[in-house]
């Protein structure tokens, strides 16, 4: 597992600045929530960590390794998106196995890993089904299993639960948090839902208009907001 360090990250789209000199360190095994309103730059920051976007300037480090120029496949990150579609023509088993098949992992090892991660996420009874035979929550668990099966150094999640109904959201939320701790994975969790961030995160980074306003434990950002905006957004206005 690794820590992630962002140094003076600027990301421009044309002459629009989506990330404005972001500095952030996510510790080894930490669950960091990236919390901010729609359009604040959360996904852009996550994709920069993943290597999907290259920063206009600044550096990304995994531990002391400068990964700024590395493509996603060389960073060993697991990605879970809000609308991350499963492969519709593949069974749950195949969906989870696919990243390992791409890496030419031996069949027996794939089988062992797929079953193990499926057990952890309580989808081991569903391995022969197709995505259309699953509920939304089950589909999202499969997407999480597929991200975890590669044993990523860093797990990156972009509003992964926002398409689920309230009850399922709570259930998968608890599951995710338990797994992250159990596996000791470094996780960055993007959300615009302050309750989710407060309940799940070790620390929260509050982002607005491409700038990180405050980083702290849930207690710190909730009870000691450095800006009016932070208090207001977290539901504890001055
Ligand atoms: P969030 O995930 O917090 O909702 P995003 O990171 O998706 O925000 O977007 C931040 C800002 O950058 C928005 O104003 C968005 O329109 C802009 N943006 C994001 N991606 C692109 C892109 N590929 N091209 C141009 N503008 C973009
Ligand atoms: Mg987004």
Image (tube, rainbow, N blue to C red):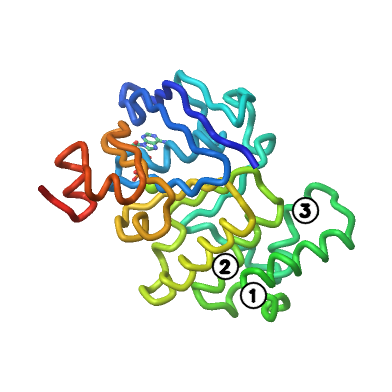
Q: Is residue 50 above or below residue 99?
A: above
Crowdedness near tag 3: few (<14), some (14–19) or many (≥20) residues, C-alpha within 10 Å: many
The mark lying in front, picked from 1 and 3, is 1
The answer for how far apart the CA atoms under marks 1 and 3 are is 18 Å
Instruction: Indicate which disc, 1 or 3, sits on the residue closer to the N terminus.
Output: 3
Q: Taking 164 as reference, is 149 left or right?
A: right
Q: Are marks 2 and 3 in contact (CB under 8 Å)?
A: no
The answer for how far apart the CA atoms under marks 1 and 2 are is 7 Å
Q: Is mark 1 within 8 Å of ligand 2?
A: no
Which quadrant of the structure image shows residue 57? top left
Secondary structure under the numbered disc 1 in the rendered image: loop
Disc ID at residue 141:
2
Q: Which residue is mark 3?
A: 100
Residue 42 in the image, given as x and y percentages of width and height:
38, 42
Residue lying at the far top of the rendered structure:
57
Which quadrant of the structure image shows residue 235? bottom left
The answer for how far apart the CA atoms under marks 2 and 3 are is 18 Å
Residue located 60% across and 31% down the image: 62
Residue located 40% across and 23% down the image: 10
Residue located 49% across and 69% down the image: 172
Q: Nearer the viewer, residue 60 or 178?
A: 178
Instruction: Indicate which disc, 2 or 3, sits on the residue closer to the N terminus.
Output: 3
Instruction: Indicate which disc, 1 or 2, sits on the residue closer to the N terminus.
Output: 1
Q: Which residue is mark 1?
A: 123
Secondary structure under the numbered disc 3 in the rendered image: helix
Disc ID at residue 161:
none
Q: Are marks 1 and 2 in contact (CB under 8 Å)?
A: yes
């Amino acid at each position: 597992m690794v820590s992630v360090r962002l140094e003076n990250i600027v990301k421009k789209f044309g002459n629009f600045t989506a990330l404005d000199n972001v500095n952030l360190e996510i510790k080894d095994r930490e669950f960091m929530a990236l919390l901010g309103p729609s359009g604040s730059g959360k996904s852009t920051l996550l994709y920069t960590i993943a290597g999907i976007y290259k920063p206009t300037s600044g550096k990304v480090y995994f531990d002391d390794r400068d990964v700024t120029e590395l493509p996603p496949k060389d960073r060993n990150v697991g990605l879970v998106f809000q609308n991350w579609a499963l492969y519709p023509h593949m069974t749950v088993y195949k969906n989870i196995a696919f990243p390992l098949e791409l890496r030419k992992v031996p069949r027996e090892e794939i089988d062992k890993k797929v079953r193990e991660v499926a057990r952890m996420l309580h989808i081991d009874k569903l391995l022969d089904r197709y995505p259309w035979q699953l509920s939304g929550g089950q589909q999202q668990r499969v997407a999480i299993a597929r991200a975890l099966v590669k044993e990523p150094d860093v797990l990156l999640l972009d509003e992964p639960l926002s398409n689920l109904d309230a009850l399922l959201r709570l259930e998968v939320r608890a599951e995710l948090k338990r797994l992250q701790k159990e596996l000791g994975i470094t996780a960055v969790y993007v959300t615009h839902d302050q309750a989710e961030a407060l309940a799940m995160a070790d620390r929260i980074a509050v982002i607005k208009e491409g700038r990180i306003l405050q980083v702290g434990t849930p207690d710190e950002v909730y009870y000691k907001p450095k800006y009016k905006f932070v208090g207001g957004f977290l539901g504890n206005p001055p």
